[in-house]
Amino acid sequence: MILSVSRRTDIPAFYSEWFYKRIEEGYVLVRNPMNSKQVSRIILTPGLIDCIVFWTKNPRNLMQGLDKLNSYNYYFQFTLTSYDKTVEVNVPEKKELINAFIELSKKIGRERVIWRYDPILLTSRFNKEYHFKWYKYLAEKLHPYTQKCIISFVDLYSKTERNTKSLGIIPFTDESMKEIAGEFSSIAQKYGIQLETCSEAMDFSEFGIKHGKCIDDELISRITGKTLSIGKDPNQRESCGCVKSVDIGAYNTCKHNCLYCYANFSKNTVEKNYLQHNPDSPLLFGVLKGDEVIRDRTMESYISPNQGTQLRLFEV
């Protein structure tokens, strides 16, 4: 099994104490995002987890306990953009995050720290020239400490469009996306960084940019030294190349409060849920009320020759 920690929230930044307690106790409870009465129990023992993929804008809190993960394989998707607090409201200063990126890479190796510059959005202030300037600045700082950068162009879901209304986002055209992709590719090539896209239908192969896999079976094979047999994640968009994983996060719990975030409905909802967080609870937030159906997740290793081996525990 591949564990995603997490597309739905920044567990390393805000819930690292909870995560390490879940590792220590060996399981976690996760509510179905579409039905809160359905709860999965996921076993977290090293023999059942092929790899952990962390998603974060600030890994500092998690970095303090990385020795607790010595029995696990893992890598980081580290989002580091050029936006200020008018867009990424509670994200720390960029210089601090650059230093965190460098320290993390020195601890675990540059292959296991993927730089994400996403999503790219355009406004009168954050125009193409702004992105070109700051992408080059970040590439210059980060290239000794990463091998890959993933980019995407902002998707304006209804709640994203509502939350970013004050920014005056300028819609992308095919031409503007190609111009940005081409310039980013030139910069990335200069610094020896492999550039890939995340969930983008448009083909940028003319600039040497591949469709990426954020949950990447090829990278996991290199990290583990073993062959994986795993298919595309059917729960993700058609344009997403990620392989199958299990996410242990919860929506409406990320306190970064980035305006472009698809995982938060509103700041008030996030604050309400955060008040219900207990580091000792098997749930990320809230408590069991007794009327839930708790089922143990079927655990499957994708590492050969163990592919297809499953462990199903009792159901409650």
Image: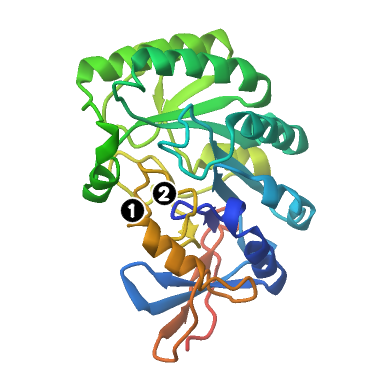
Disc on res. 231: 2
Q: Amino acid at mark 2?
A: Gly
Discs 2/1, front: 1
Instruction: From the viewer's side, name the closer residue of 227 and 315.
Output: 315
Q: At 69% from the left edge and 31% from the top edge, which residue is drawn?
A: 99
Please identify the residue farthest to the right as the structure is shown.
Answer: 67
Query: Do tag 2 and tag 1 residues touch (Cβ < 8 Å)?
Result: yes
Q: Within 10 Å of the Cα at label 1, are there few (<14), some (14-19), or many (20+) other Cα atoms?
A: few
Q: Which percent across, then down, holds residue 295?
A: 45, 80
- Asked if residue 53 shows in the view, the reply is yes
Q: At 47% from the left edge and 13% from the top edge, which residue is drawn?
A: 133
Q: Which percent across, then down, holds residue 159?
A: 26, 50
Query: Label 2 to label 1, Cα distance in Å?
Result: 8 Å
Read off the residue under disc 1. 234
State left or right for residue 286 relative to residue 98. left
Q: Which percent across, then down, holds residue 221?
A: 60, 41
Instruction: Assign the N terminus to one quadrant of the image.
Output: bottom right
Q: Amino acid at mark 1?
A: Pro
What SS does tag 2 mark? loop
Q: At 51% from the left edge and 70% from the top edge, which residue is drawn?
A: 275
Q: Within 10 Å of the Cα at label 2, are there few (<14), some (14-19), or many (20+) other Cα atoms?
A: few
Instruction: From the viewer's side, name the closer residue of 79 and 32.
Output: 79
